[in-house]
Image (cartoon, rainbow, N blue to C red):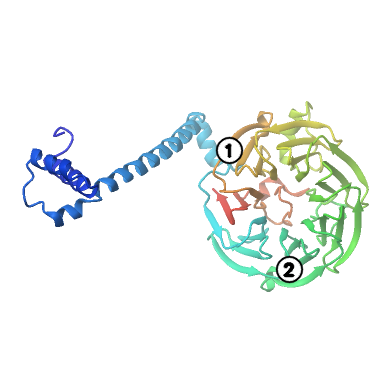
């Protein structure tokens, strides 16, 4: 004993053992130990009382510390394996190269204020504003750089299901849609005043996206908005007038998601009928049906041109499509726990398997090399397209409950219109060196938190 503890520590231990035995109503054992250790009368009843719970406190704190040590050891092992798999050259390259950045725990900000599950998030194309929608009927606007709540926007009478920033250059608006059958437009430049409500859908409106303008001959001037609904239709709206300019039908059931191509020429939709569909945005004509999922498709997204090189290799092509071409490849995520990557003709290129529950959100890394997914299995996963879609990173602690949505902050495009699409790809005709990738990603969850992952 004396080899491990100092004489003072040993004395403290003895006294706490005697006090514990006395408190446990074992007076004979306590007296025998007291006599054997020759502890004098100075250790009276009052002093004994002070030592009563010391042994138990020490014991519980040791168990707690052991658990903490085990957690830290596991974290250390994972960080070490990350380091081991990276050479000094690749590490320095990764630090300098935004195309190699991936989100990592812990999140920079954990934003809390919603009272019900979060359904959607969206970044302002220019400012550090982040909007989140919730089943609590509200939209909250956050400053993602500071991690502070700026305001709560109220107006919907049921759950808010999706939000998106966009609109004509210099006139950014926020669009939201809800189970209350409406789409609402809010003006960020006028304290998020509700400037227009768009009625027309006959059931819950699941998704809403501004249609980017860009390519010559593109149908949009930045004034168009597309929505997807449980009434099985897509609708295209002119936000300047509030009129529905086109209704697109073809899905056999609830349309869960819609995504426009980076130049506004194409629309991609997916839903409960287990199909994804490609449409010509200007005519509303159906182009391709993507068949292969075995359950509801929750999310769909176009691959940015930066991904074409990797995806064309996966597809077995010698040469990638031109970067000016849109809608070459798409990705879908389903309740069947799989992510599928397709070409625009409907050919399945790859199925990515790894999630243990419904896939709820997908976003391509603006650098093109990775696909990020979130799921009801509480994780965020990163798939490397340069390695045939290999799973290269998993954030097991992304959230404490189902992860319902993910968005990447749009890239800053200098001297050109900013893209509204979530891929953050550069517009047609905009040189790559004019586009600055923002290394910021946001997720929302049933755990009532929005998390911001940033470099």
Mark 2 neighbour class, 10 Å CA radius: few under 14, some 14 to 19, many 20 or more: some
Q: Nearer the viewer, residue 353 or 311?
A: 353
Is 42 situated above or below 137? above
Q: Position of residue 196 (x, y in %)?
A: 79, 71
Q: Check if mark 1's residue and mark 2's residue have beta carbons within 8 Å.
A: no
Q: Quadrant of the N terminus?
A: top left
Identity of the residue drawn at 72% across and 38% down: 307
Q: Position of residue 164 (x, y in %)?
A: 72, 58
Q: Do we see residue 314 in this rendering?
A: yes
Give the quadrant of residue 26. top left
Identity of the residue drawn at 77% across and 61% down: 179
Disc 2 secondary structure class: loop
Disc 1 secondary structure class: strand
Is 149 situated above or below 311? below
Q: Do we see residue 258 in this rendering?
A: no
Q: Position of residue 206 (x, y in %)?
A: 77, 55
State the residue position of label 2.
157
Q: Nearer the viewer, residue 32 or 154?
A: 32
Marks 1/2: CA–CA distance: 37 Å
Is 5 situated above or below 123? above
Instruction: Give the left or right position of residue 6, taking residue 269 as reference.
Output: left
Instruction: Give the left or right position of residue 247, taking residue 117 as reference.
Output: right
Q: Which mark is residue 394?
A: 1
Mark 1 or 2 closer to N-term? 2
Q: Position of residue 370 (x, y in %)?
A: 66, 38
Which one is closest to the eye, mark 1 or mark 2?
Answer: 2
Identity of the residue drawn at 63% across and 60% down: 116
Instruction: Give the left or right position of residue 342, taking residue 82 as reference.
Output: right
Identity of the residue drawn at 62% across and 51% down: 443
Give the quadrant of residue 18. top left
């Amino acid at each position: 004993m004396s080899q491990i503890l100092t004489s003072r520590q040993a004395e403290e231990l003895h006294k706490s053992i005697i006090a514990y035995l006395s408190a446990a109503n074992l007076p004979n054992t306590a007296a025998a130990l007291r006599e054997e250790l020759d502890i004098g009368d100075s250790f009276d009843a009052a002093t004994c009382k002070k030592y009563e719970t010391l042994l138990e406190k020490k014991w519980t704190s040791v168990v707690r510390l052991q658990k903490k040590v085990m957690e830290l050891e596991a974290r250390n092992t994972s960080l070490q394996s990350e380091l081991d798999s990276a050479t000094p050259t690749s590490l320095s390259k990764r630090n300098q190269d935004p195309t190699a950045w991936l989100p990592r725990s812990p999140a920079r900000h954990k934003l809390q204020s919603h009272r019900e599950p979060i359904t959607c998030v969206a970044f302002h194309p220019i400012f550090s504003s982040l909007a989140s929608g919730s089943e609590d009927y509200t939209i909250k606007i956050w400053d993602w750089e500071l991690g502070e709540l700026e305001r709560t926007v109220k107006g919907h009478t049921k759950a808010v299901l999706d939000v998106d920033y966009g609109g004509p250059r210099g006139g950014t608006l926020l669009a939201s849609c809800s189970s209350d059958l409406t789409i609402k437009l809010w003006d960020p430049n006028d304290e998020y005043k509700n400037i227009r409500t768009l009625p027309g859908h006959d059931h819950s409106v699941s998704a809403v996206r501004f249609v980017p303008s860009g390519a010559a001959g593109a149908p949009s001037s930045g004034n168009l908005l597309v929505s997807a609904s449980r009434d099985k239709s897509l609708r295209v709206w002119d936000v300047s007038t509030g009129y529905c300019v086109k209704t697109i039908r073809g899905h056999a059931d609830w349309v869960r998601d819609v995504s426009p191509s980076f130049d506004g020429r194409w629309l991609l939709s997916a839903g409960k009928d287990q199909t994804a569909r490609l449409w010509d945005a200007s005519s509303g004509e159906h182009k391709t049906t993507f068949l292969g999922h075995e359950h509801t498709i929750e999310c769909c997204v176009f691959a940015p041109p930066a991904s074409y090189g990797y995806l064309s290799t996966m597809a077995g092509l010698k040469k990638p499509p031109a970067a000016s071409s849109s809608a070459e490849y798409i990705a879908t995520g389903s309740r069947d726990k799989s992510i599928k990557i397709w070409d625009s003709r409907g050919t399945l290129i790859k199925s990515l398997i790894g999630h243990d529950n419904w896939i709820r959100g997908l976003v391509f890394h603006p650098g093109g090399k990775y696909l990020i997914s979130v799921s009801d299995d509480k994780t965020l996963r990163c798939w490397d397209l340069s390695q045939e879609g290999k799973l290269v990173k998993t954030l097991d602690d992304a959230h404490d409950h189902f992860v319902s949505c993910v968005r990447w902050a749009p890239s800053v495009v200098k001297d050109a219109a900013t893209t509204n699409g979530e891929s953050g790809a550069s517009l047609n005709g905009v040189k790559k060196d004019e586009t600055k990738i923002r290394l910021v990603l946001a997720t929302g969850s049933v755990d009532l938190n929005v998390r911001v992952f940033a470099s």
